Amino acid sequence: MQILISIPEAMNWENDKNHNVKKVNKMFKEEIREVSHKYKISQSNIGRGADWIVYILEYFGYAIGVGTVISSLLAYVEIYERLKVLIAKMNEKKYPFFIDIDTATIVCLSKVYEELGSCEEVEILLKQNVSKIDLKSAFFDDRPKERLDSNPFGYYIISIVAKKESKHYTFVFCITSLNKIKFKDMFINTEFEFLNSQI
């Protein structure tokens, strides 16, 4: 799970990555650790031509793969509630930020919970970033392809199926890396309910 934070005043900081990372950690330490103590912060650049210095916050242990079956939806809702504390701090400071597809999936899981409450079982059917704005090739460094600074401008399609009271509810979301839900739809997986929802 990754969040990329843009701090405008960081452009005037010293040219010392380690010092700057410690500074960011100090600024957000309480909010970051609200989510988990297992994290790493690193400095990167996503500007083509002019520098755009950003800080990547990586949490460990929150990857959600396609086919993952979740028995406790509430556990992910609680993660999102803790994440909202960090998001509120960034919004308060007017710092732009980007989220990766795992973070976006947690946002979508919270929306499923808002609509259905507790479910017997939830499965991730689809996770796809359909944006191909690749920055890795523009920088001659060793940034991993899967890291958020290689493709921060994400446009994610996420589908989730939730089972509740013998019905299966399929959700389809389109959410951007700017944490904006552009589209959400839901249908129930029975012939009658499906046809009824399309009329």
Image (tube, helix red, strand yellow):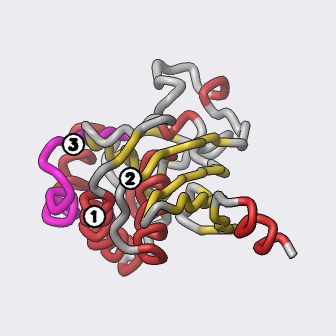
Q: Which image quadrant is residue 118 in?
A: bottom left
| Residue displayed at 24% across by 58% down | 75
| Residue displayed at 64% across by 67% down | 186
Question: Pointer 1: what residue?
Answer: 74
Question: Pointer 3: what residue?
Answer: 39
Disc assigned to residue 25: none
Query: Sequence-wise, which precedes: disc 1 or disc 2?
Result: 1
State whether residue 185 is above or below residue 66: below
Dot 2: element: strand
Q: Position of residue 120 (x, y in %)?
A: 35, 58
Q: Amino acid at mark 2?
A: Glu
Disc assigned to residue 121: 2
Q: Nearer the viewer, mark 1 or mark 2?
A: 2
Residue stretch rendered in magenta on the structure: 26-43
Marks 1/2: CA–CA distance? 11 Å
Q: Position of residue 12 (x, y in %)?
A: 40, 57
The stretch drawn in magenta includes residue 40? yes
Q: Quadrant of the C terminus?
A: bottom right
Q: Amino acid at mark 3?
A: Tyr
State whether residue 7 is above or below residue 91: above
Marks 3/2: CA–CA distance? 29 Å
| Residue displayed at 25% across by 55% down | 24
User: Does the CB distance between marks 3 and 2 fall below 8 Å?
Assistant: no
- Residue that extends furthest to the bottom in the rendered view of this protein: 92
Q: Position of residue 63 (x, y in %)?
A: 37, 38
Query: Sequence-wise, which precedes: disc 3 or disc 2?
Result: 3
Q: Position of residue 102 (x, y in %)?
A: 44, 46
Q: Nearer the viewer, mark 3 or mark 1?
A: 1
